[in-house]
Image: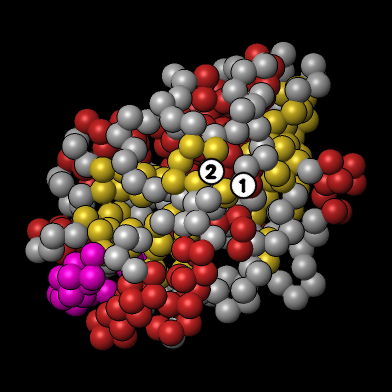
Amino acid sequence: MIVAEFDVLPCHMPQSDPGWRFSIHANRVSKGWLVRLVTDTGVTGYGYASATRHMGASAEGLKGALEAFAPHVIGRDPFNIEACLAVLDHELTGIYQAKAAIDCALHEINARALDLPLHHLFGGKLRDEIPVMRVLSIKAPDEMAERGRALVADGYRFIKIKVDGNVNDDFERVRAIRDAVGPDIRLTIDANQAYVPKDAILIANRVAELGVEIFEQPVAADDHAGLKLVTDHTPITIEADESAGSLREVMVLVADRIVDAVSLKVPKLGGLRNAVAAARICEAGRVRCRFGAHVGPRLMSAQAAHVAAGLAGLEFACEFGEFVRLTNDPTEGIENIDGKVAVPVGPGSGGALKPEAEAVGSDAYPMPADA
Ligand SMILES: [Mg+2]
């Protein structure tokens, strides 16, 4: 069996809330590409390349990288994933989001060719469902509180609050949300690098009294000294996201105990194999990990859920439910029910293109005119 076809299909998904924003960007459209690999025996696998500009991946850059990678993938045995990824690493350093799409598509082909669920390729699963943490966009405190209340009414027990880097404003946001959702909802805040270290320590200690458990990426991604300062001066779990943009970076964060936890994402780490490797590094170093926001089509969350299902060290909710705030999803196979996702049964990830998307190809989900 060899890979016979390599296609790159647009997968641009507008936010249902046009005002959705975090501290760095306000992405009106979540942009990316679906890679479709087809073998000479007719097995198809899809993977998603996520254009996350604050992680160094533009939509245009990803498309160019994927097109450059195509000749290195076509003709290869899809079971030989290591060899394929080694060639791509040699061809172009970094651009992990493009490599992740190919890694996911190859794993999907393997599992489907063997007629197995994807998690069988990674040692099986320890759990059948995973609690979902939903993310609140930065808005005025009362509006965020209202949206938090709506999430709880929908069954979610874990909420992540995007914050902006201003101690007083952010404290008011968290206080309004805590008042609205009650004492039992598990809260996280995420600054996306917006704080300077001393202010981060201040807000961390203030929101600790409101029961916030995790503070994600308080300061600049490359400010390891600042991150460690925050980690060492607050009772809250400090979690790296943008700082953990590669296996090498995860290893450094864990080895030097710069953070208490790491947010794993399949796109930024370069695929399912590297996400598992990063989790193992965390586990060995006694640093917590969980899967962060997989913002894009359902297919991506389905694939990530299969590897998350088998990680013993996973101990907090994962962000596998953000697809519900995006429109135009060409894929299906996983849903949020009562604040959780069930690990799809398979074959493969259980995630797939919708029949109507299969029928008419990429034209079914074009770039929206106002994107
Ligand atoms: Mg984050």
Question: Which residue matches tag 2?
Answer: 341
Asked whether 296 or 207 is in front, the reply is: 207
Q: Which of 225 and 211 is in front in this view?
A: 211
Q: What residue type is labelled 1?
A: Glu
Q: What residue type is labelled 2?
A: Val
Q: Give yes or no for residue 192 being in the magenta stretch.
A: yes
**Which residue appears at 50% of the width and 73% of the height?**
147
Q: Is residue 38 visible?
A: yes
Task: Residue 273: give x, y in percent of width and height.
Answer: 46, 30
Q: Please report the bounds of the magenta region as a residue range.
A: 189-211
In the image, taking residue 135 as reference, residue 257 lies left or right, namely: left
Residue 335 is labelled as 1
Q: Which mark, by number, is residue 273?
A: none
Label 2 residue SS:
strand
Residue at (26%, 37%) from the top-left corner? 282
Q: In the shown orientation, is residue 39 left or right of residue 204?
A: right
Q: Which residue is drawn at 65% across and 69% down?
A: 16
Q: What element carries label 1?
A: loop
